[in-house]
């Protein structure tokens, strides 16, 4: 399917690894121009080199979503590089296995990174997106439907991201802006992929089964498809939502969790 993104410009905040990078690769392969933003310049450079070659612009900008003014500056830099902005994906959000009893400082860190980082990026992008219509994709999590005691700050702020996204869709829909939130389940990103080998070594499980067994035995995740997701599977969804192919889809919270039983 042609996504119709050729000659359009997109900014992926959190696009240097995982699901954000997977989305960037799909968009690049479809001929879009891209700016990917992340904290680590070296990681960003490697991510840029991994994108499919094409005629569109390819660039990176450094950004720390917790720093006041940094996201706004990154959005303006991206618009200058691209000459336009047709879509924004915000795939940031620290994952912390911490309970509600953590300190105010830790709660504040989750607020700054998970929620306010998304708010800052969207707030800065909206004036550009309303000029010709545009798209926004944010990242929730499957755990917002089943908050776990050991991830309560994370799940709480991801819930707020979903609510914020719905509000953006309602507020700016009349100006041609669509906004949707994806809620990934257990996705085998780099960090989780490293766990596979660790579990195989520590527990003597076959490598190809190690992560799946721990997901059931320790994490108590009942997943219909019986495996973790792949970043590229989420990346394809993000790219679709950013494209005109999803032209009547807005304000949605979309699970992509393999059928996890909440």
Image (cartoon, helix red, strand yellow):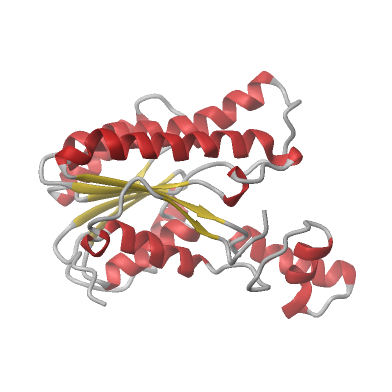
- Residue at x 64%, y 33% (from the top left corner): 153
- Residue at x 62%, y 47% (from the top left corner): 143
In this rendering, would 137 be left or right of 253?
left
Q: Measured from the top left, where is residue 156 in percent x and y?
A: 59, 34
Outermost residue, top side: 104
Q: As displayed, is residue 189 above or below residue 226?
A: above
Q: As displayed, is residue 50 above or below residue 20?
A: below
Q: Measured from the top left, where is residue 116 in percent x and y?
A: 45, 29
Q: Report the quarter where the N terminus lies.
A: bottom left
Outermost residue, right side: 203
Q: Measured from the top left, where is residue 151 in percent x and y?
A: 69, 40
Question: Could you say which quadrant of the image residue 23 lies in?
Answer: bottom left
- Residue at x 74%, y 33% (from the top left corner): 99
Q: As displayed, is residue 52 above or below residue 171?
A: below
Nearer to the camera, 120 or 140: 140
Q: As displayed, is residue 23 above or below residue 75?
A: below
Report whether residue 192 is seen.
yes
Report whether residue 48 is seen.
no
Nearer to the camera, 35 or 7: 7
**Tag count:** 0
Question: Could you say which quadrant of the image residue 98 lies in?
Answer: top right
- Residue at x 55%, y 34% (from the top left corner): 157
In this rendering, would 257 be left or right of 128?
right
In this rendering, would 68 be left or right of 131?
right
Q: Measured from the top left, where is residue 227 in percent x and y?
A: 66, 72
């Amino acid at each position: 399917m042609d996504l119709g993104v050729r000659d359009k410009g997109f900014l992926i905040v959190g696009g240097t690894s995982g699901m954000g990078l997977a989305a960037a690769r799909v968009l690049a392969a479809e001929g879009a121009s891209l700016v990917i933003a992340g904290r680590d310049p070296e990681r960003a450079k490697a991510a840029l080199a991994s994108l499919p070659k094409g005629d569109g612009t390819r660039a990176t900008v450094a950004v720390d979503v917790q720093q006041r003014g940094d996201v706004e500056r990154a959005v303006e830099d991206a618009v200058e590089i691209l000459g336009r902005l047709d879509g924004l994906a915000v795939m940031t959000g620290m994952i912390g296995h911490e309970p509600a009893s953590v300190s105010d400082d830790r709660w504040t860190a989750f607020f700054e990174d998970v929620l306010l980082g998304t708010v800052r990026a969207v707030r800065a992008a909206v004036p550009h997106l309303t000029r010709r219509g545009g798209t926004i994709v944010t990242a929730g999590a499957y755990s917002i439907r089943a908050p776990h005691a050991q991830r309560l700050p994370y799940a709480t702020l991801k819930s707020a991201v979903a609510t914020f996204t719905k509000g953006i869709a309602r507020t700016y829909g009349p100006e041609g802006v669509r906004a949707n939130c994806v809620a990934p389940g257990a996705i085998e990103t780099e960090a989780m992929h490293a766990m596979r080998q660790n579990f195989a070594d520590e527990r003597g499980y076959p490598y190809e089964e190690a992560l799946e067994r721990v997901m059931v035995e320790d994490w108590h995740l009942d997943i219909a498809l019986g495996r973790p997701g792949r970043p590229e599977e989420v990346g394809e969804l993000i790219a679709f939502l950013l494209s005109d192919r999803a032209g009547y889809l807005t304000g949605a919270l979309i699970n992509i969790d393999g059928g996890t039983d909440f």
